[in-house]
Image (tube, grey):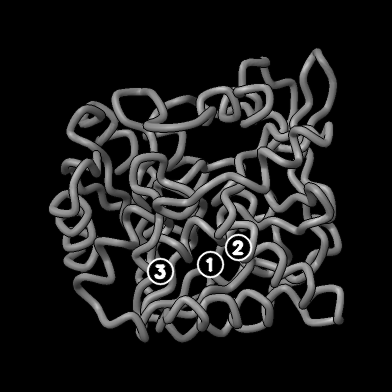
Amino acid sequence: MITALAGGVGAAKFLAGLVKLVPEEELSVIVNTGDNITLHGLYISPDTDIVTYTLAGVVDEVTGWGIRGDTYHCLEALNKLGEKTWFKLGDKDIATHVLRTALLNKGVTLSEATAKIARSFGLGSAILPMTDDRFETWIRTKEGTFHFEEYLVQRNAQDSVLGIDFIGAGNAKPAPGTIDSINGSELVVLCPSNPIVSIGTILTVNGIREALEKTQARKVAISPIVAGKPIKGPADKLLKAAGCEVSAFGVAELFKGILDAFIIDAADSQDRNRIEELGVEVIVTNTIMQSMEDKVALAKTVLEV
């Protein structure tokens, strides 16, 4: 069994390659829910949906999110009604959020709703939210404090980050199946997602980091930093705000104590010795996933560590 800790696009790309090499049924994915947000009365799980759509083979590969070929009639109508439509929701995508919201309103847990949606898309892998409890990531800036999706999408992550708040972290319990998945796996992968507000968010849930420290599984992470910069998103601003170095080494240091091996890009090979001094094995390879061949090759490297 393999357990993956995942954020959105970067993680989904890696997982798309991984399921070409291992049976879907042998994979469990613990997904960040700190980005979850309610818009237009709908409860949206951005990272969960990206992973689900990708593994189902329906994701829009140009954007990395949403459903391929989707239309936007509902969003256009909402805009005409005076609603703020900065968060792009396709018509088919909205159906997912309608179902999730309806299930939650009936008292179904987020885990149960997520599992039902995954089954509806024909997935064999277990998609597990990190917690069923309320948990939101908020970003503090000079212009105010914003939900992470507002900061990322509406404000295009342009503001300097003064701090990060994890609302609900103190009370959040691991969702059913998450700890058992970590304990029962031979391999745990920390996907190439934002180390602060994706993987880092998962690690703030009570008991998850401790489970990673204790598990007998081999623990491998893939750096989301290449040539000293994030491949996608504001990881550099968030690392700085958290007091971390913006480098592959900075990410490895953040995960110290829960890693056996760390995969970095050839462009960051100068960090190898410093990372090894943390007691972590380092593998240098290409981590840029531009094609399915790249995704499979990176997944193969992880499996061979």
Q: What residue type is labelled 3?
A: Val
**Observer able to see residue 277:** no
Q: Where is residue 37 in the image (x, y as percent from the top left)?
A: 75, 50
Which residue has dot 1 on it? 213
| Horizontal arrangement in the rendering, residue 252 relative to residue 292 (left or right) | right
Give residue 188's mark: 3
Could you tell me which secondary element the residue under label 3 belongs to? strand
Residue located 45% across and 62% down the image: 53
Q: Are marks 1 and 3 in contact (CB under 8 Å)?
A: no
Q: Which amino acid does label 2 sit on?
A: Arg
| Horizontal arrangement in the rendering, residue 153 relative to residue 271 (left or right) | right
Q: What count of labels does the image hold?
A: 3
Could you tell me which secondary element the residue under label 1 belongs to? helix
Residue located 27% across and 41% down the image: 264
Q: Where is residue 225 in the image (x, y as percent from the top left)?
A: 37, 33
Q: Quadrant of the C terminus?
A: bottom left
Q: Where is residue 90 in the image (x, y as percent from the top left)?
A: 57, 49
Could you tell me which secondary element the residue under label 2 belongs to? helix
Distance from Cα at disc 2 to Cα at disc 1: 6 Å
**Observer able to see residue 81:** yes
Query: In terms of sequence position, does the residue under pointer 1 or pointer 3 come before the other?
Result: 3
The image shows residue 173, relative to residue 140, as above or below, that is below
Q: Nearer the viewer, mark 2 or mark 3?
A: 3
The image shows residue 299, relative to residue 176, as above or below, that is above
* Front residue (pair 163, 50): 50
Q: Do the residues labelled 2 and 1 touch (CB within 8 Å)?
A: yes
Q: Nearer the viewer, mark 1 or mark 3?
A: 3
The image shows residue 284, relative to residue 258, as above or below, that is above
Which residue has dot 2 on it? 209
Query: In terms of sequence position, does the residue under pointer 2 or pointer 3 come before the other?
Result: 3
* Front residue (pair 21, 76): 76
